[in-house]
Structures are given as structure tokens and as C-alpha cells.
Amino acid sequence: MSGIVFFKTGILSEIKEFYIEQVGCRIWMDQGDCVILSHGNFLFGFCKRYDADIQGTITFFFCTKDDVDIMYEKLKSISSAKPELNQNYPIYNFFAKDPEGREIEFQSFTEPPGNYLTCDELLLTRRSIRQFEEKPVPQEVLESIFELSRYAPTSRNTQSYYFKLIDKKETLNWIGQTRGDNSAPIGRAPLAVAVCTDPEVSMRYIQDGCIAAYHFILAAWSFGLGTCWIAAMDRDDVKEVLKIPNNHYVATITPLGYPAGTIPEAPERKERFFFVKQ
Ligand SMILES: Cc1cc2nc3c(=O)[nH]c(=O)nc-3n(C[C@H](O)[C@H](O)[C@H](O)COP(=O)(O)O)c2cc1C
């Protein structure tokens, strides 16, 4: 479910061009004398009329402070002041005016906001994260991620998977050194999650576990939390330390935490035609 905020405008084509070229919005639907634009999951429309709505503020938010600075560099000439931390709210922001005089605001949050990514953004921006901030993951965020993860598909809806939360520094360090560089991200995270399945519950326990793990990974990213699939964790020593029954399957153990530093660029992907065979 979603919604759209509409504004009347006297200069539709100029407004459309401004929001697309300068602000980076996309056309979501063109209805002729009304155009609906998207900025992430924010939908807003302009309809050609004789008068214009210029009340209120249209606020665009970004993932990082750097993104706000980039917008400022672009819109400096129409901005009222440089971006700054606003002490009243946990934001970093600046204001500008659109060609019709509407107030527009650009901001990032200094505290992690709730989840807001579109499906495209979620799938395109998720990365394997291997460096983490020390910042703790709030309990309610963890609960929301596990709640979303309940909807992973499983063979015959057996729901054979479960998540084992690992938060002891000593255990994280120990698992982190089991596979050298391959597992090291676990030792750098404030938390890790072992995604396990019970073969007695599902014949397709491997698929169930892998799908549940990826569901969890996407849910975590939607809240701005980094993960990394660490392979080959279905090991006796790991299961013993984590008190996971030896016959259970460990699909992966992923570190979990807020990414430190810049999010890496996506490693190069093959073109679509390569994957789609006739
Ligand atoms: C089955 C599987 C095993 C992986 N094993 C590891 C691993 O042991 N250690 C690691 O750091 N990354 C591991 N990765 C992460 C991949 O390196 C990563 O997904 C790939 O380079 C693409 O980058 P992206 O996830 O940022 O798009 C694994 C990913 C998958 C799907």
C-alpha cells in the first residue's frame, strides 16, 4: 500500500523537468495534465491548473550525510543555507526552493530510521558487508527483522528453519577465525545469526535454510543492517560451540550490524541476457 501527495502547478513542464533533472526523481506515471513522480518510495504528483499550491515543505531524505552534501553542491544557487545538523531533530539538512517557490528540504537522519526502501532499492543496493560499527542493534529492529523472516517459503510449509542469535564477543571472535578471511567478518560484528534447519522436519531442509537465510538478509538490509553470507559453517565444532544439534543443518552464519564506512560498490554482474536462456 502507498499514497500520493498532489500539488497544483501553473508550470507543469518546468516543474517536471526540475524534479527529474535537479532532484533525481523519476516519472512514476504520466497522466497528461498530471504527472506523478517518485523519489524512492515517495510518490508525489503535479497537476496543471491556473493557480499553484506552494504551501508546506516537500522533504526528500537520503541514506547518508554525503548524499545530502552532493545535493547541496548541485542546488547551491537555490538553497537558503549550507546543510547543517539540526539539534531539534536527529537530522542533517538544508532548504531550497523549486521554480514555483515551494520549499523543498533535503535531509539524512543521524539515527537509523525505520525501513523505507523500495523493492528495486532493496535488491540493487544490498551488499555483503564485512566491516561493522560497534553500535548495538535495537531489540525492536531485531524483532521486526525476525518477524519478516517468518514469511520465507519452505517445502510444504514445514517451516523447518530457526535463527540462533550469537551476541557473545568471545563466541563471535571464535567463529570469526574458523575459516580465516572467509569468516573474519563475523568477528568484526556486534551480532551474528546462524540460520539452521532440522532435517527431521523437512526433506528439503537445505533449500529451506538457504531461502530463510536470504529472506533474513534482505529483511535486515531493509532496516539498514549489513550481513554477509558466510559459507561452510555446517561444521561439528561450530555446532558444538553454538549448542546446535549435530544432525541439524547450518545454512550460513551471517554477521549482523550497522555497516562501517562507505557501502561497497556492487561487484560487476553479468548482463541479463547471459542468465536468460531460451
Ligand atoms: C553461497 C555463498 C557463499 C559465500 N561465502 C562467503 C564467505 O565465506 N565469506 C565472505 O566474506 N563472503 C561470502 N559470500 C559473499 C559473496 O562473496 C558475495 O555475495 C559476492 O561477492 C557478491 O557481492 P554482494 O553480495 O555484495 O552483491 C558468499 C555468498 C554466497 C551466496
Image (spheres, grey):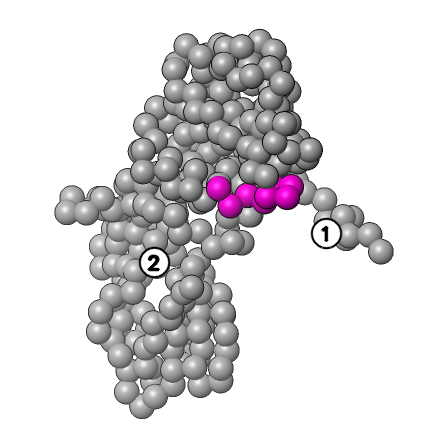
Task: Determine the secondary structure under disc 1.
Answer: helix
Residue marked by disc 2: 60
Question: Which amino acid type is marked by label 1?
Answer: Arg
For the point 59% across and 39% down, the residue is 158
Q: Is residue 65 above or below residue 98?
A: above
Task: Residue 156: say if magenta.
Answer: yes
Which image quarter: residue 168? Answer: top left
* Left or right position of 235 against 142: right
Q: Is residue 73 above or below residue 137?
A: below
Task: Determine the secondary structure under disc 2.
Answer: strand
Residue 267: % across, % down = 62, 37
Which image quarter: residue 256? Answer: top left
Task: Residue 132: say if magenta.
Answer: no
* Left or right position of 73 against 95: right
Residue marked by disc 1: 272
Q: Main secondary structure of the magenta part?
A: loop
* Left or right position of 103 against 5: left
Check the image and name the residue furthest to the left: 88
Q: Which residues are magenta?
A: 150-157
* Left or right position of 147 against 154: left
Q: Residues within 10 Å of mark 1 (few under 14, many from 20)?
A: few
